[in-house]
Amino acid sequence: MAEKVVMPKFGMSMQEGTIAEWLKKENEPVKKGEPLVTISSEKITNELEAPANGVILKIMAKEDETLKVGNTLAYIGEAGEKLDTSSDEGDNPSKFSTETSASSEVAATAVLTEEKQATDIGKRIKISPAAKKMAKSNGVPMEELFGTGPQGRITKQDVQNYLDQTSAIEEEKESPVTASGIPEQPAKKHTNSKVTPAKGMRKVISDRMHQSLQESAQLTLMKKADITELQEIQKQAKQELQKTDADISLTLTAFIARATVMALGKHKSANSAFTNDEIHTYETINLGMATSLDEGLVVPVVFQAENKTILELAEKIYSLSKKARENRLSSDEMKGSTFTITNLGASGIEYFTPILNPPEAGILGVGTYQKSVVFQCGELAERTFLPLSLTFDHRALDGDPASSFLNEIVYYLEHPYQMLL
């Protein structure tokens, strides 16, 4: 008997997932435990393994399609086995009857003739999260969309229909005419370029970063901190820890995290978010630590960072970054952050303009430290400086409090003993 493959629940809060890429095709053999499909949810991308040996009898969900947890993705069984998928009709958003397909064509015609779906004043628009994101990114008015999904819900295909019909209308307009009266020819397309569809983690990152810049007023302040004493303390701490059984190393990142948390405790306006014309200021500090992977960027979260010592911060940051590199992070470990730190020091970058991790009001960018010779007490001295870049949402806080917050971080980095008290 064929075995059903369903949308898994990778995290406690996961409600739906998007098919990023099928790793197997229909009628292709598969072994139990072999990667079957890549699924993206929130900012996490995981591979779903085949639950049994057999052949892919039927794939029920297309790439880029979003389905609820528990919905059918595919069937695995014996080659040539007859399959009854009638129980899945209406289960997956993309699987509708002939009547529904016909209504989709009617909906496309309705868009073409600019007939809007009749809705009562104040009635909530039913639209899937993926369709809503697609509509926003393409500037499509949601009230002009006609839903063909269950109970009139607007799907990604409905948004695509609108875009296709709008494009067709534009193409039908007269081509621009040159001064000689000859129609202007369209620009020649490049034929020697490689086109790579944005899928999975790359698609999630692109959507979120575009959303961040579109929906916030971002400004970046830059300043360097003298970490000469901090490096000496870090060196001494490493030596002391090596004498113990502690399997942990006090990295510079741990000190930066501790300085940021302490500064956020004094400047609560930086630990906030601007949402729906409201400023939400958080009492708890959930510190996001941006981690670079081959596939993209993830932001695991250190929850209640204000209650952790510098050693506990170091241990948690190490644990989360290791899980990220091994692709073992759950979606719950990557949501709920209130402030983020991103570090490009290993890349040799000094200052940069990090993009906010929505809906947070602030993100701290850390560059690579540099040694410089400066005058100190009338004498030349070699010092080490760490470049910092603070991007903040000007809707949530102004330049002066943002400057004070950045100065506070610099103070703790330049007075490292304060972080150990």
Image: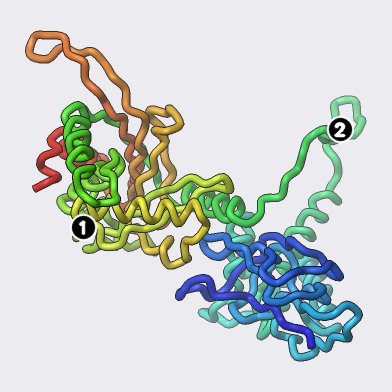
Chosen colour scheme: rainbow
Query: For numbered disc 1, what is the local secondary structure?
Result: loop
52 displayed left or right of 179: left
**Label 2 with label 1: CB-CB less than 8 Å:** no
Query: For numbered disc 2, what is the local secondary structure?
Result: loop
Residue at 28% from the left image edge and 38% from the top image edge: 252
In three-dimensional space, the C-alpha distance between marks 2 and 1, rounded to whole angstroms, equals 66 Å
Q: Which mark is residue 241?
A: none
Instruction: Say which residue label 1 marks.
Output: 308
- Location of residue 311 with respect to 279 vertically, above or below: above
Image location (x, y in percent) of residue 383: 21, 20
Q: Mark 2 vs mark 1: which is more N-terminal?
A: 2
Residue at 54% from the left image edge and 81% from the top image edge: 123
Instruction: Say which residue label 2 marks.
Output: 184
Residue at 54% from the left image edge and 79% from the top image edge: 124
Quarter containing the N terminus: bottom right
7 displayed left or right of 417: right
Residue at 26% from the left image edge and 53% from the top image edge: 313
Looking at the picture, tell me which residue is in the foreground, 108 or 211. Answer: 211
Whether residue 93 is visible here, answered yes or no, is no
Badge 2: residue crowd in 10 Å (few <14, some 14–19, many ≥20): few
320 displayed left or right of 71: left
Residue type (three-letter) at the residue carrying disc 1:
Lys
Residue type (three-letter) at the residue carrying disc 2:
Glu
Looking at the image, how many numbered discs can be counted on the residues? Answer: 2
Please tell me in which quadrant of the rendered image residue 177 appears: top right
Image location (x, y in percent) of residue 155: 68, 71
Badge 1: residue crowd in 10 Å (few <14, some 14–19, many ≥20): some
Whether residue 406 is visible here, answered yes or no, is yes
- Location of residue 25 with respect to 365 vertically, above or below: below
333 displayed left or right of 43: left
Looking at the picture, tell me which residue is in the foreground, 21 or 76. Answer: 76
